Image (spheres, rainbow, N blue to C red):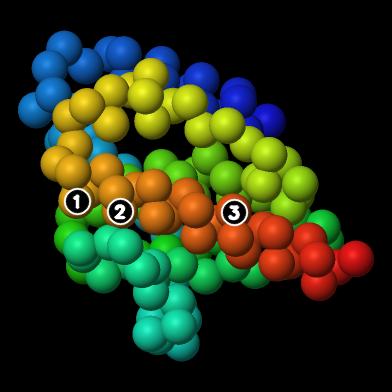
Amino acid sequence: MTINDIQDELIDEFSMFGDWMEKYEYIIQLGKELPLIKDEYKVDENLIRGCQAKVWLHADFQDGLIHFTADSDAIITKGLVSMVVRVLSGHTPDEIVHAELYFVDKVGLREHLSVTRSNGLLSMIKQMKVYALALKTKAS
């Protein structure tokens, strides 16, 4: 599946919910389903700067694809990072660097999240793109 296919799938999933309380519950559920990052990667250098909650992100580069794992100490934030991991993980550095993540607006996250959570989400996306750019450069 392409990054856009996965984004469209997420948008469809969120369209099934009538109100934002149901959507928040779904975000929390997505966080519970997030494959946990290995303890060895829960270190300060893997913390995402710009997030109020602690968010650890690790990028693994195998066979030309980047696979992300993550965790957070806050339930909503864990759900948010799980969505971004789902959308970007398993793609090439180029695909990740050039991805336009429209699902954030289409689902309504930007308008329904607090400013600190919204900034944190943008920091997660930015960090994933930085990892992709670094891995692309390293592979060249």
Q: 6 left or right of 110? A: right
The residue labelled by disc 3 is 129
**Mark 1 vs mark 2, CA separation in Å:** 6 Å
Percent position of residue 117, x then y: 22, 48
Q: Quadrant of residue 36?
A: bottom left
Residue 117 versus residue 5 in the image, above or below = below
The answer to whether residue 35 is seen in the rendering is yes
User: Could you tell which of marks 2 and 3 lies nearer the N-terminus?
Assistant: 2
Q: What element carries label 3?
A: helix
> Residue 116 bears which disc, if any?
1
Judging depth in this view, the residue of 124 and 18 nearest the camera is 124
Residue 1 versus residue 71 in the image, above or below = above
Judging depth in this view, the residue of 119 and 67 nearest the camera is 119
Judging depth in this view, the residue of 5 and 93 nearest the camera is 93
Q: Quadrant of residue 138?
A: bottom right
Percent position of residue 123, x then y: 40, 55
